[in-house]
């Protein structure tokens, strides 16, 4: 797998010592790819005990109570299907995800901010169609000018993304920690090795 740029503000699981469980919807797909749908081991054990999930895979480690011993789940699937959102929430994170954490002016990757294409000072609104990811230097260069005034161009026209598009884009940015037991459920549509 080739290295992928990981934006610095994406929170990562602390590591395998915390034993997070990958949470799959009833159709065996992750609830989300970015951030990856993970539960702390305590939530996974509780959900399994309450019969809300089916445990598909477990860690070697166990937790004990006075009356029982349970292996920590590493992959769980919900028994009831959770319907995906029909509309993508307009959040800073989803905006960066739509633009693939890339400046829409120069193509730089890394720490991003956002920019109003038509500046708010000129009546521009904070909407999917008027806000793009931008690196700091481009954002400063543009300031409250129009694209024409500062001789800048957009790499692609901003638009409202579909929730499924954001999920698919999220697959391109895997977290630093992926447990082996999760792999069959994360890249189920990847090309098979010959």
Image (cartoon, rainbow, N blue to C red):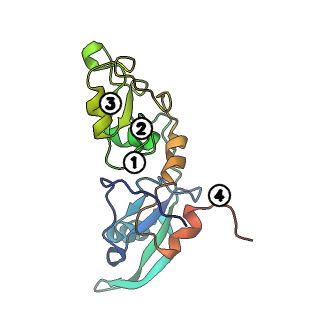
Secondary structure under tag 2 reads loop
In three-dimensional space, the C-alpha distance between marks 3 and 4, rounded to whole angstroms, equals: 34 Å
Q: Nearer the viewer, mark 3 or mark 2?
A: 2
Q: Which residue is mark 1?
A: 109
Tag 1: Cα neighbours inside 10 Å, few (<14), some, or many (≥20)?
some
Residue 69 visible in the shown view: no
Q: Which residue is mark 4?
A: 189
Provide the residue designation for mark 2.
Answer: 106
Chain-order first, disc 4 or disc 2: 2
Q: Earlier in the sequence, mark 3 or mark 2?
A: 2
Name which quarter of the figure residue 105 lies in.
Answer: top left
Q: Residue 83, how many percent across, how many down?
A: 52, 44
Pointers 1 and 3 in contact (C-beta within 8 Å):
no
Q: Quadrant of the C terminus?
A: bottom right
Distance of label 1 from label 4 (alpha carbons): 26 Å
Would you place residue 142 above or below residue 83 in this image?
Answer: above
Q: Which numbered disc, 1 or 3, marks the residue closer to the eye?
A: 1
Residue count near mark 2 (Cα–Cα under 10 Å), binned few <14, some 14–19, many ≥20: some
Instruction: Identify the residue at image location x=39%, y=38%.
Output: 95
Mark 3–mark 2 distance (CA, rounded to whole Å) = 13 Å
Earlier sequence position, callout 1 versus callout 4: 1
Q: Is residue 83 above or below residue 42?
A: above
In the rendered image, residue 65, in percent from the top left (x then y), is placed at 29, 83
Q: Quadrant of residue 19?
A: bottom left
Q: Position of residue 108 (x, y in %)?
A: 40, 44
């Amino acid at each position: 797998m080739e290295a992928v740029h990981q934006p610095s503000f994406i929170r990562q699981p602390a590591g395998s010592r915390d034993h997070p469980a990958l949470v799959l919807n009833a159709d065996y797909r992750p609830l989300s790819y970015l951030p990856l749908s993970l539960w702390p081991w305590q939530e996974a054990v509780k959900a399994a005990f309450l019969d809300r999930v089916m445990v598909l895979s477990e860690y070697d480690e166990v937790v004990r109570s006075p009356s029982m011993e349970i292996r920590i789940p590493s992959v769980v699937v919900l028994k009831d299907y959770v319907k995906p959102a029909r509309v993508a929430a307009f959040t800073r994170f989803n905006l960066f995800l739509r633009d693939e954490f890339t400046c829409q002016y120069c193509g730089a990757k890394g720490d991003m901010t956002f920019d109003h294409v038509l500046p708010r000072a000129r009546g521009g609104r904070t909407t999917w169609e008027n806000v793009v990811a931008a690196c700091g230097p481009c954002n400063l260069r543009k300031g409250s000018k129009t694209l024409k005034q500062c001789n800048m161009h957009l790499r692609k026209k901003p638009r409202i993304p579909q929730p499924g598009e954001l999920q698919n884009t999220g697959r391109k940015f895997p977290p630093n920690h992926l447990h082996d037991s999760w792999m069959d459920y994360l890249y189920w549509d990847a090309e098979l090795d010959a």
